[in-house]
Amino acid sequence: MLALIRRRTPEPSAIKRDPAPTRWSYKYQRLMLTPAFRASVRIGLPVLLIVFIATAWFTNDANRLMLTTKISAWTEAFQHRPSFMVAGMSVEGADSDLTAAILTDLQLTFPISSFDLDLDAIRASVIAYAAVKDATVGVQTGGVQPGGTLHIGVHQREPVAIWRYQDDLWLIDDEGMTTSLLTARADRADLPLIAGDGAKAAIIEALALFQAASPISGRVRGLVRMSERRWDLVLDRDQRILLPHENPIAALQRVMALHAAQDMLTRDIITVDMRHAARPTIRLSQPAVAILRNTTATQAELGQ
Amino acid sequence: MMRDLYDSQRAMRNMRKAAMQRGVVAILDVGTSKIACLVLRFDGPEKFREQDGVGSMAGQSSFRVIGAATTRSRGVKFGEVDAMQETERAIRTAVQAAQKMAQIRVDHVIACVSGARPRSYGLDGEVNVEGTVVGDGDIGRVLAACDVPDYGAGREVLHAQPVNFTLDHRSGMADPRGQSGMKLSTDLHLLTVDAPAIENLLYCIKRCDLELAGIASSAYVSGISSLVEDEQELGAACIDLGGGSTGISVFIRKHMIYADSVRMGGDHVTSDISMGLQIPMATAERIKTFYGGVVATGMDDREMIEIGGTTGDWERDRRTVSRAELIGIMRPRVEEVLEEVRKRLDAAGFEHLPSQQIVLTGGGSQIPGLDGLASKILGQQVRLGRPLRVQGLPQAATGPAFSAAVGLTLFAAHPQDEWWDFEVPAERYPARSLRRAVKWFKDNW
């Protein structure tokens, strides 16, 4: 018996179904196959969307305020972590006066975050002291332990001489820089004294001269710069050794040699003039001249 | 008129150059039974087979087929556009599918026409060589010196290929440039087609937002792809049995010297079957492709083919037909096509060629036993031809039905020198007087 309802059997169709695309779908497909357009859709559109959303969010004042406060709170919390805190400070290499001055000047209240410490400014303010030659500033953090230390290493100027200037006594170092005022000469009797205009600038030569005058160091009163050009070595008993402009050390060594050989400086001499190398001159004191003159007269009488 | 042609063809060549620079060009074979679209990618020479020792063969390694699509043709009759909207839609279908496969947008298309009543002319021209050595200008002048026949108002030149150059007494030169001689003459093969047919096709392509970068005769391009090199050299005819028209092209010395088309093809066989057996065209096409043939044997009387019925009357409408009957319907029509081809070849003087190889290609050449029938009508040297293999072509598109499409790819990669590839002769420029003055100075000082 045949079925009453005929089952639809798929007929072998000779013609393959191949519908033509519409003009618009054809154009759309061509557009989507254009590389530049595809790139703009794939990258341009999302970027545009993100920018649009971000702009819309940022135009609201409350949102901006919220963002800035949140960011500052985060930075605050981060910078004030215990591992970044500095608990105290230490000054090394400075004498007690300088240390006290530095401590009072910096005006730091501990504990402080190391982010708030301006190390360059601290170093600059320490170097600004006349007595400080150089300084190193660093924070030694406590590692995992909380609390660090601010280290200030001070390299103080070493006074090597006393400079008399307009009735004041100044300590100066080997660079000619004044370090501090001295109230009395006797406070630093160990240091030699220099004076005169331009004496400070020629400190190195002065030190060399003091070195050369070491055989008579007990008698040396000081060096005086004459005409910002040459030195006079002043001894006690108002004796002066006038040194030349050029090669003063060699001249002083000659004087020392004479002194060693003939005890020249112990004699009654006021001035040894070494300014002319070929003609060293000495000037006797007035009594010595008189005595010498008497001696000469006596010898003449005796001889006659 | 020639000037316009020169300029339009020049513009087309420039378009092709632009397409080559972009590296992608589409091939469009608008036929009567199917429309094929191939997308080619040009990568410069020797891109794909650097590793093996064989270099490029016929240059086809410089491109690769990256997209291929075929669709049932609509609105095309005798290889000409019959219903413009339908054809446009069919072209759109094929192009879209090929683009989708290639994943790239195609803007330039090279098309071929199979119908449009092609007509061949052989022209010759002769000039004296300027100077002692033949230069590009001389070639341009000798091509311009060919006297163009009056081929009619509604016709357009499709190909104008110099097939031979003669310098003084030496003939058969392919490229006389750089050789010394006095008198240069050339033979030019001119192929004209009906202008409206071409214009309709161009309009359809333009409606699909595509730019035409070249146009060729389908008989010519299927000859390029299905004739082997020595056949092209020694003389052969390519018979492209298409759906609505049958293309004929004759080659010798690697140049096409004659092309024609018979306005009959496989669709006529199908319609004969449809009328003879009273079945729809689709069924007729199907039984033609499955059971068709041209030589009946005793066995075929017993092989019954169900031709079915679409009336819905399952009880009574169950007809069968023997294969011998089918062959009896097909054979006269195929014979008629081949006889017509024979006539055209005789008119072209094909029997005077040194070799008379005939190559059958196109979708119609797949009828079993066709080569036997053709050798009775066309001559002994008949073979069935399949198109050359090109890189990347899908297996489905390697059959003889695609010889025109494959030939177009070769044409796109290596177009033959045509008349418009050479510079126009200097006489057309106003610079002529200046040039003459320079020449006068050179001669006198």
Image: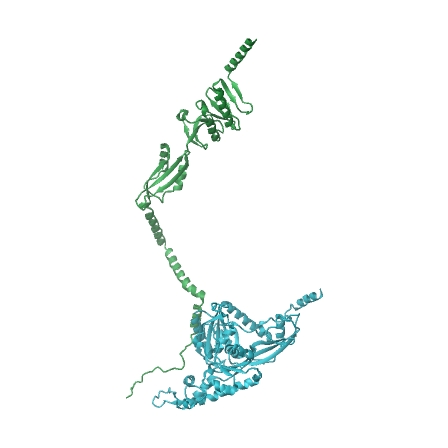
Chain colours: A green, B cyan
Residue drawn where x is 41% and y is 62% of the image? A43
Residue drawn where x is 36% and y is 34% of the image? A99
Q: In which quarter of the image is residue B307?
A: bottom left
Can residue A136 be seen in this snapshot? Answer: yes
Q: Looking at the picture, how far across and down is residue A7, in whole percent?
A: 31, 83
Q: Quadrant of residue B302?
A: bottom left
Can residue B85 be seen in this snapshot? Answer: no
Q: Looking at the picture, how far across and down is residue B34, in whole percent?
A: 45, 79
Q: Looking at the picture, how far across and down is residue B33, in whole percent?
A: 46, 81
Report the quarter where the C terminus of chain B lies. bottom right
Vertical side of A195 occupied by A43: above or below:
below
Tell which of B45 and A47 is nearer to you.
B45
Report the quarter where the N terminus of chain B lies. bottom right
Q: Looking at the picture, how far across and down is residue A103, in whole percent?
A: 35, 36
Residue sitting at the far left: A1
Tell which of A174 and B210 is nearer to you.
A174
How many numbered discs sit on the rendered protein? Answer: 0
